[in-house]
Amino acid sequence: MKIKLNEIPEEGRSYEFNRKTAELNSILADIISDEPYDIQFFIKPLNSKDFTISGMIKANSPEICSRCGDSFKYSVQKKINEILIPKPEVDRTGKYAKSSVAVSEADDGVSVIEYENSQFDLGDFLHESIAIDIPFNPMPPVKMNGDCSLCDKPKNRDAVIYDENLSVEKKNPFAGLKDLKLKNIKLN
């Protein structure tokens, strides 16, 4: 889903997306499945080329607990605070390096995203914004004592230490082969 930035009025424009409006259902399906979501944001021009986006993303992602293996809904609640700038034009001999992911220095900081041809790919931006907030090893919230709120399993309170004695010389697995001798047997 692309937004034509040259059609945004000077006073800005509000957008709201959810499961009922359905514009983003297929774009977000791989990360939130058929869970409800609520995305609200506001785009306003700063000048003829640069824009600000601010708003909020609320969504649930079906995940599997990395502690117990039970299914749960991981809640994503994220503020949007971005500045859109046009992608610099580079001739065929020019070099230009950029990150493909918007990175913010602080949670409430502003990050910069580039757009091309006066269009902002909102679907890709929102998909990436939600996906980056889902941890690699998702866990449901914990209780006050640190136990899992889903399965009541205790939090692993002791650090796991793998202690291997590296000073012991390991035996060569092929050392036993040196004593083997082959016999020549003639078959008639």
Image (tube, rainbow, N blue to C red):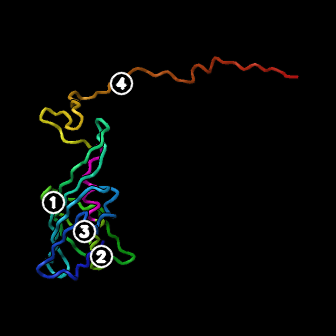
Residue 30 location (% of width, % of height): 35, 57
Q: Amino acid at mark 4?
A: Glu
Q: Is residue 185 left or right of residue 53?
A: right
Residue kind at label 1, given as amino acid type: Lys
Label 3 sits on residue? 21
Any magenta on residue 157? no
Among the two numbered marks 1 and 2 on one chain, the one whose residue lies closer to the N terminus: 1
Q: Would you say the residues marked 1 and 2 are in contact, meaning their CB atoms lie under 8 Å apart?
A: no
Q: Residue at x 25, y 63 (%)?
A: 19
What is the three-letter code of the residue carrying label 3? Thr
Q: Which residue is mark 2?
A: 116
User: Gap in Å between the C-alphas at discs 1 and 2?
Assistant: 24 Å
- Report crowding for label 1: few under 14, some 14 to 19, many 20 or more residues within 10 A (C-alpha): some
Magenta stretch bounds: 125-137
**Label 3 element class:** loop
- Which residue appears at 11% of the width and 79% of the height? 11
Q: Earlier in the sequence, mark 3 or mark 4?
A: 3
| Residue 79: assigned label | 1
Tell me which amino acid carries mark 2.
Glu
- Could you tell me residue 3's position as x and y percent? 26, 75
Q: CA distance from mark 2 to mark 3?
A: 26 Å
Residue toward you, 32 or 107: 32
Query: Residue placed farthest to the right in the image?
Result: 188
Characterize the local packing of mark 4: few (<14), some (14-19) or many (20 or more) Cα atoms within 10 angstroms. few
